[in-house]
Structure formats: C-alpha cells, structure tokens
Image: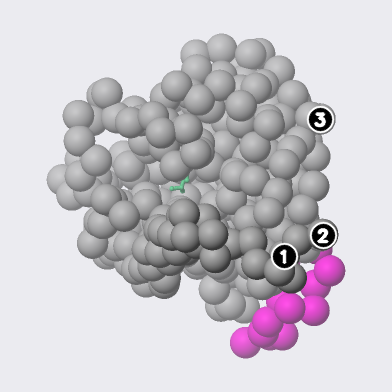
Amino acid sequence: MSNYLQSNVTKVTTHVLQNMKQSGEKIAMLTAYDYSMARLLDGTKIDIILVGDSAANVMAGYKTTLPITLNEMIYHGASVVRAINRALVVVDMPFGTYQGNSKEALASAIRIMKETGADAVKLEGGIEILESINRILTAGIPVMGHLGLTPQSINKFGTYNVRATEEAEAKRLIEDAHILEKAGCFALVLEKIPAKLAAQVTKEIKIPTIGIGAGPHVDGQVLVLHDMLGITQQFSPRFLRRYHAIGEEITNAVKQYISDVKSMDFPNEKEQY
Ligand code: KIV
C-alpha cells in the first residue's frame, strides 16, 4: 500500500482519490452543511465533504430531499467551502435542476461551482441523466455519480428499502456504473444495495466507489454527519453506526442551562462586568 495515508496531501483532488483506489487506501466521506461543522471535519483530515441534499431533511426538516432549492444548496455549499483547506468538497445538485434539460443542468452546475467554490457536483441517476452529465463534464466540472437508492426518486420507488435485490435491477445498475465511468465521472456513490453487488461494481470499474449501506467491499464509505453523531435520533437503518449521542448531550446541556437561569446560578460573579 502506498503512502497511507494521504495525510501528507495538502488538498484532496480527484487525482488523489484515484490513487487511493489504486493503492487500496479507503476513502472517508461525511456530509456537512455549515461553516462550523465543516471546519471541525476538515481538521480531522476527512477526505471528502459532501454538501448533501440531505440538508433538506437534517437542516430544514423536510420529509424528503425534493423541496431543497438551488439557492439553498448554494448557501450551504458556500458556507462549507469557506471552512475548508484540505477536503474535496462535493455539492449535490438538487431535484429539478438537472433532470430532463441538459442546458439547465449545465447552468445549475456552473452556478454551484462559481457561487460556492466547491470542487465537484453530484447527480443521482444513470443513463437517463447521461446527457446532463456529459454537458456538465464538457465544462470541466468534475461529476460524482450516485446509483442504487437515489432519494430524489422516492416518489417512484415508494420506499427507502434496499435497491437492486432483483437480477434485472442489479444488471441495470452495473450497466449504469459502466456508463458513468465511461462518461468521465470521477467517483460513484452506491446507496443501500446488496454488499455483493457493490463489491462486483467496485471490482469492475476503475473509478472509486463510495458506499452507504453497501457493505465493506467498496473504495470508501459515506454517512450523514447528523446521523452518525446521534443528532438525528429517530433514524436508525441497519447500515448506520452511531459514533456519538450528541443529541442527548445537547439536551442535557440545555436542560442544565435552563435550570441555572431559573435558579440564578448563571451568570455568577465571574461571568459579569
Ligand atoms: O444527500 C446526501 O447526504 C447523500 C448521501 C446519503 C450520499 O447523497
């Protein structure tokens, strides 16, 4: 294995990620939507920060990712980029900004790149959005693909269950992965698909695969920050490992503050002028 760890790199690029796949070093990716969290994450030497449209759920409280707008994603993207020195920053293109009209897709991607300073964009889907991906790539904008459970299509799927368990859908997913690789995507998110299928895709394509609920045999992993930290407490799919219970810690801290205010324990003599 070459230099584990890419800790020496000053800025993670798509080229660095490609080298990581080749050397077998796993890629760690998390979401962030604001300056303060992104700053903490960048200090840990996380490889990729995704400004996911999961912001619609965890930041804005929508039930699906569909309502978030391009302006809102740009606001989150720019806030994150202002905090970053090292990580590669990818911004999700929101629902309705790239499907069906490749010129609009390019215009949306250009706005994201110009107004956020991000390094790349991510789009959900395979052959059906190929024209948009091609047009964005011709402008020199790096594109991350996203196959399997694609939450922007929740109204078509009807559930957030694991995808591609049937042979026909698995075959289509493999074909789509090859199409996205050939088009020039620099990496591919595989969401909630059988581990065996994710392993096969990872072996067959040369670009890095980043899994979420896709098992261990992928080139990297991604989780939603608020889920892995235990800020969102009601969401607990099998693939989610909780690394902390920050939600509980926040609740306890706020309860203590309320109690201190009511009892006039806060502010004390040292906390006044
Ligand atoms: O929006 C998001 O957070 C995502 C990840 C789940 C991959 O797309």
**How many angstroms separate mark 2 from mark 1 (CA)?**
7 Å
Residue 257 point in image, percent of width and height: 50, 59
Q: Secondary structure at mark 1?
A: helix
Q: CA distance from mark 3 to mark 1?
A: 44 Å
Q: Residue at x 42, y 70 (%)?
A: 244
What residue sits right under mark 3 in the picture? 114
Q: Residue furthest left?
A: 166
> Where is residue 37 drawn, in percent x and y?
63, 56
| Mark earlier in primary sequence (3, 1) | 3
Question: The disc labelled 2 sits on which kind of residue?
Answer: Tyr
Q: CA distance from mark 3 to mark 2?
A: 45 Å
Is residue 204 visible in the rendered structure shown here? no
Is disc 2 placed on a helix, strand or loop? loop
* Disc 3 element: helix
Residue at 80% in and 72% down: 9
Q: How is the image coloured?
A: one colour
Q: Which residue is mark 2?
A: 273
Instruction: Report the magenta residues as a range.
Output: 1-17
State which quadrant residue 139 falls in.
top right
Query: What residue did someone put label 1 on?
Result: 271
> Which percent across, then down, holds residue 210?
48, 58
Are dots 2 and 1 in contact, CB under 8 Å? Answer: no
- Which residue is at the front of the view, 96 or 55? 55
| Residue at the spot 32% in from the left edge and 42% down from the top edge | 149
Q: Which quarter of the rendering shows the N terminus?
A: bottom right
Give the quadrant of residue 69. Answer: top right
Closer to the camera: disc 3 or disc 1?
1
